[in-house]
Image (cartoon, rainbow, N blue to C red):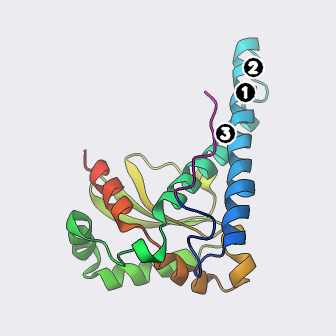
Amino acid sequence: MTHKLPTLPYSFDALEPHIDAQTVELHYTKHHQAYVDGLNKALEALAKARENGDYSSVKHLKRELAFHGGGHVLHTLYWGNLCPTSQAKGKASGELLAQIEKTWGSFENFEKEFKTCSAVVEGSGWGVLVSFKGNLEILTVEKHQDVYLIDAVPILVCDVWEHAYYLKYQNKRPAYIDGFWSLVNWEEVEKRYEQSLK
């Protein structure tokens, strides 16, 4: 199975002014593409190892598979989590909003915790809202190759690797996260939440 870069659901400049066109283009065509290429390379090498019955490099190949596969999956979710400001409705609704309010007391409390968790990830990583069969939790993910939680479905991801924001925001990660928040495609997040309930 060969993985491909998914189609970006908007133009490079569609997330302006919060995320600039140059960052989107580099992030998507260079960084995300590198994860796809690395994933395909790891899968090909693993297939050859299996074919030859030579598992001497399996530890390395499994790490490559996890690193590039995790990066590809999370980036795919990230692009789908975003939409132009004109289409963003600013807040969750329906069952997702009800569960957020049940868990955090209010949407505003949830927003504050998600932004704070994303801002304090050490080094590079992700802020991730996950659903455990409907129950919600916010995770800080420093190394996406090390994340494996049974029954955890990521429904909202914020990329806080420097390549996601450094051209526009430099070291001002919280300002980037505020911009990200203005672009969240809550309809997509709600859809992922509903799927996690099945």
Q: Which residue is mark 3?
A: 65
Name which residue type carries label 3.
Leu
- Secondary-structure class at tag 3: helix
Name which residue type carries label 1.
Glu
Q: Nearer the viewer, residue 177 or 70?
A: 177
- Horizontal side of residue 164 vs 188, given as left or right: right
- Secondary-structure class at tag 2: helix
Q: Earlier in the sequence, mark 2 or mark 3?
A: 2
Distance from the alpha carbon under mark 2 to that under mark 3: 14 Å
Q: Is residue 197 magenta?
A: no
Name which residue type carries label 2.
Lys
**What is the quadrant of the C terminus in the image?**
top left
Q: Tell me whether the residue at label 2 lies in contact with that at label 1, contact meaning CB atoms closer than 8 angstroms.
A: yes
**What is the quadrant of the N terminus in the image?**
top right
Q: Quadrant of residue 137?
A: bottom left
Q: Which residue is mark 2?
A: 48
Q: Nearer the viewer, residue 144 or 19?
A: 19
Q: Residue at image x 57%, y 65%? A: 126
Q: Residue at image x 41%, y 46%? A: 150
Question: x%, y% of residue 42?
Answer: 72, 34
Distance from the alpha carbon under mark 3 to that under mark 1: 10 Å
Q: Which residue is mark 1?
A: 44
Q: Residue at image x 75%, y 27%? A: 45
Above or below, comparing residue 129 to residue 144 in the picture: below
Question: x%, y% of residue 30?
Answer: 75, 55
Q: Is residue 3 magenta?
A: yes
- Secondary-structure class at tag 1: helix
Q: Which residues are the magenta region?
A: 1-9
Question: x%, y% of residue 169?
Answer: 69, 83
Q: Residue at image x 33%, y 85%? A: 108
- Horizontal side of residue 158 vs 136, given as left or right: right
